[in-house]
Image (cartoon, coloured by chain):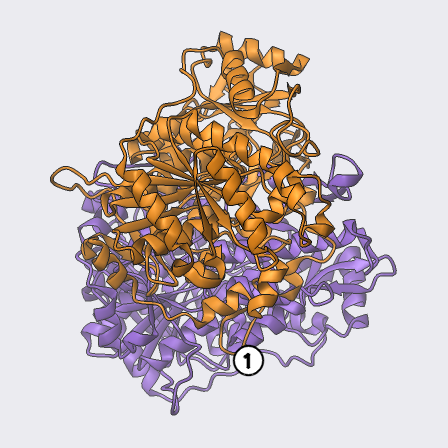
Chain colours: A purple, B orange
Amino acid sequence: MSESQTQQLEMTDLAIAGRATLKPIVEIASAAGIDEDDLELYGKYKAKVDVFRKKAGEANQGKIVLVTAMSPTPAGEGKSTTTVGLGDALALEGQRVVIALREPSLGPIFGIKGGAAGGGYAQVLPMEDINMHFTGDFHAITSAHNLLAALMDNHIHQGNALNIDPRRIQFRRVMDMNDRALRDVVIGLGGPTEGVPRESGFDITVASEVMAIFCLATSIDDLRERLSKITVAYTYDRKPVTAGDLNAQGSMTMLLKDALKPNLVQTIQGTPAFVHGGPFANIAHGCNSILATNTAREYADIVVTEAGFGADLGAEKFMNIKSRFGGLGPDAAVVVATIRALKMHGGVPKTELGQANAQAIRNGFANLKRHIGNIRKFGIEPIVALNRFTSDTDEELAIVEELVRAEGAEVAIANMWAEGGEGGRDLARKVIQAVEKPSNFHHLYDLDLSIEDKIATIVKEIYGGSGVEFSAAAKKRLEEINDNGWSNMPVCMAKTQYSFSDDAAKLGAPTDFTISIRDLQVRTGAGFIVAITGAIMTMPGLPKEPAALRMDVGDDGKAIGLF
Amino acid sequence: MSESQTQQLEMTDLAIAGRATLKPIVEIASAAGIDEDDLELYGKYKAKVDVFRKKAGEANQGKIVLVTAMSPTPAGEGKSTTTVGLGDALALEGQRVVIALREPSLGPIFGIKGGAAGGGYAQVLPMEDINMHFTGDFHAITSAHNLLAALMDNHIHQGNALNIDPRRIQFRRVMDMNDRALRDVVIGLGGPTEGVPRESGFDITVASEVMAIFCLATSIDDLRERLSKITVAYTYDRKPVTAGDLNAQGSMTMLLKDALKPNLVQTIQGTPAFVHGGPFANIAHGCNSILATNTAREYADIVVTEAGFGADLGAEKFMNIKSRFGGLGPDAAVVVATIRALKMHGGVPKTELGQANAQAIRNGFANLKRHIGNIRKFGIEPIVALNRFTSDTDEELAIVEELVRAEGAEVAIANMWAEGGEGGRDLARKVIQAVEKPSNFHHLYDLDLSIEDKIATIVKEIYGGSGVEFSAAAKKRLEEINDNGWSNMPVCMAKTQYSFSDDAAKLGAPTDFTISIRDLQVRTGAGFIVAITGAIMTMPGLPKEPAALRMDVGDDGKAIGLF
């Protein structure tokens, strides 16, 4: 949420959430057609839906609306808010709609960032619970991940029958916490009875391959199969060692079996929403779970879902990774844009984004224009949602409308932070028209291309770059990938979200740049190859004044200072 | 559970649990008089009870029966089974009864040990859930603990205004996992942007001071106050630094506020049971939460609860620590004994415990006799529960009955693993008689004694030792404790459970031994001083063939190999 928005309403997201009247989740489920016997309640307002009970007959397959964004400002353009608000607006338009969102990570809440449950009057509730422990999914993922790590180190300590080279272990531990001090550690110290000393580190839970797997699994059996394929290390003779080699997949599956059931909550307006899974959008694919999206489709005619960061990252991964593994494709895509982001891409410094500047908007439109073109490359006709801020003038909004229409695309001004679903009715009507047309969705590349060619395709078609350079380390990894027969996996690009290029400072729609692939990471369980450009942070730190210091529990038993 | 018992019934605890028919937890709660509005459901068979809602009128205060044991064999004497079975037996005898137990730790489940939810036909259910994530309490405790650690390391990294000496940090991180490699680690590596390098380590979550605090807190405010008092480190000039100095207590409380509500489940027979909190019984006090015990008293005429390890450890700490902080005292104490343990204390090797040996039983009785005498020192008349195993002969059981009666104590043969509550009706009747008498309960020592004198009192009165020796390190700690005004806290003895002495090999009722205090640990948040004798493991490791390797999820979606 932006500062101006907070000032406008003089209320925080937490305060707005606190004033909302929730319906019992059994009522929300019942209205959505979810059998009460399939519900596992977590208090009165949260439930898991047991999707593993056998059902008779053919399941409904609702249309999918993917909400993505132009290249964002550091504050974000309101993608989650638009996703939630669009769901509410579609409900107001008489549609049978279910929203599917990612779960927020606990760690960053104590740093600077708020949650990812929407904002203002377009939020999912109970906001406090969703942002804190929720139904325990991330804790289960943390446990499953760290059990595999413990089994691996124990295997080495107990004789190392698999001949694991402790210097070539790629599987680290995770914690759902912003804890800088755990980024690089040496473990196994203390002598021969305390394990084998080696370098390692902790990532935040959302960066775990187990998290990515959790979000891509289509069943318990698929989950187990993917877990068993995680490459944890290499032997002294450079052969990959998997979780399956350690026989860890069964106990990991056991730890995850309940978490894998999608979580049902509601928006302030009472629209049903699945909030489930939340992988990083850089080193992973950044979308909620396939099980949640597909379950939402069973109970809806339209499912509104989102993908992390800008469309060059989130939407590309949704369409090339999640869509492929989940057997689903979007029927429409909404690209969230803001006047502030357009100005920023037009060269305006951060401190002056609140000032009127028509020319900067026209200049910055190049960024949005490229995203519009990119969405069309997947066979989808994009709709631009212009997320209104209080500092925006009517003239500025009109400029953007004109520019988007000149591209032949639909555009709607949305004001859902302040007005909830009512603020998105124009957008909703345009989305309804879009999903009524047959979808021409297709992936951008075929899996039988080489990893180099897949990366080159993304760089040229989506980023607008001229080519790709591989570091020496990345070239070595490419050989390894080919030798091990891993080249038929899709690519997961880890790149800055601020630019189409790998340089966060190159705003707008840069051309004539090459993308440098520093390293490639093999995620054989998730089923993709991560291509790393620049420095990627997998364990955030806390700032000098962490948000945690303002948090407490009030006399009413509710959280204080959560947002 | 013993092998012979398993063979007898040819069913595992998990199989027995799986065949039981559970009642919806709302029915269990309703029968116990718990208002449905106070319930927060976690599925159909688990609920948290919101004890923080204001209630009118005076709360009922049921009698407390503490289940403890003689010095155990490595397999344990069936204390949890007796606790659960006695609760069921008391219900069969027409009593209004609620059970209060500890939550099992996730970590050891993947090693060798099973859960701590009773066994056979004296179990709490749903066993699978209770042993895996349950309602997320331990995960919340892990998060709160590690948030404090992250805030501390971040404080040092961001300028260290409190002047913390990184070499004198006593607060480690925790994980609910048996992970040997994390016992001793170096963190903060990687250069100036990655934190300050220092030695540290991970304990298992049940060893966390936050866990001890969680179990001793009587309200949200008391929880926050205790958290703020945790001593995390010392400054360069040796002044203690607390969680309160770091202003971490509010956010930690926020993470724990829901977990702090006691969890309600049921036994196989349908008796209500609170399963809540589970601190180590060596470096902490080893009892379920005060809030659970006191909530159980509100809804019961008799509460059956247990304390970890043998009576020299668990019962002593229950009566000197938990009782003191919780404003509660036992009205009766049940000492669980087995023929196998008596034989072991009579000098029989582990492999021959199944063979008849009357003389060994008579010799080993010295151990049980001392425990009987010890319970009386707290003003409580003990009842011996002789937990029957299939290898026990009638003659052997008769010998024990005769020996116990010669001490003027009551004894009952219990067979609750195989028979459930029916197997404990004689024990139940004797317990009912005992709680009808007025309690003369008192603590063993006054808090204004010095730490040395408190330890000496425990060593002489409970262990039967002749004196105490303090290491040089412990002496230095004593000075520090006196200088900081911490000497008025109770003592928490960390000692082997296998012997009254600090030498696990000294079985029976050893005399003329001294206890060596190797170190003292200050737990200013929990409010006790830990006196450490010998080596205490706070992070277990996995065995060569971890139980995890046999675990999985079946086609029915249920856990396989959990026990």
Between B127 and B329, the one nearer to me in the picture: B329
Between A44 and B55, the one nearer to me in the picture: B55
Q: Residue furthest right?
A: A237
- Chain of the residue displaying label 1: A
Question: Going by the image, does B448 lie left or right of B350?
Answer: left
Instruction: Give x and y (percent) for residue B539.
Output: 62, 40
Name the quadrant of the C terminus of chain A: top left
- In the figure, B152 relative to B309: above or below? above
Q: Which residue is mark 1?
A: A443
Instruction: Give x and y (percent) for residue B17.
Output: 46, 66
Q: Residue at x 31, y 50 (%)?
A: B98
Q: Is residue A494 at least partly visible in the picture?
A: no
Q: Residue at x 67, y 54 (%)?
A: B354
Q: Residue at x 40, y 68 (%)?
A: A262
Question: Going by the image, does A336 lie left or right of B109?
Answer: left
- In the figure, B206 relative to A513: above or below? above
- In the figure, B535 relative to A51: above or below? above
Question: Going by the image, does A29 lie left or right of A105?
Answer: left
Between B403 and A223, the one nearer to me in the picture: B403
The amino acid at mark 1 is His
- In the figure, A321 relative to B195: above or below? below
Q: Is residue A165 at least partly visible in the picture?
A: yes
Instruction: Give x and y (percent) for residue B301.
Output: 24, 45
Between A127 and B232, the one nearer to me in the picture: B232
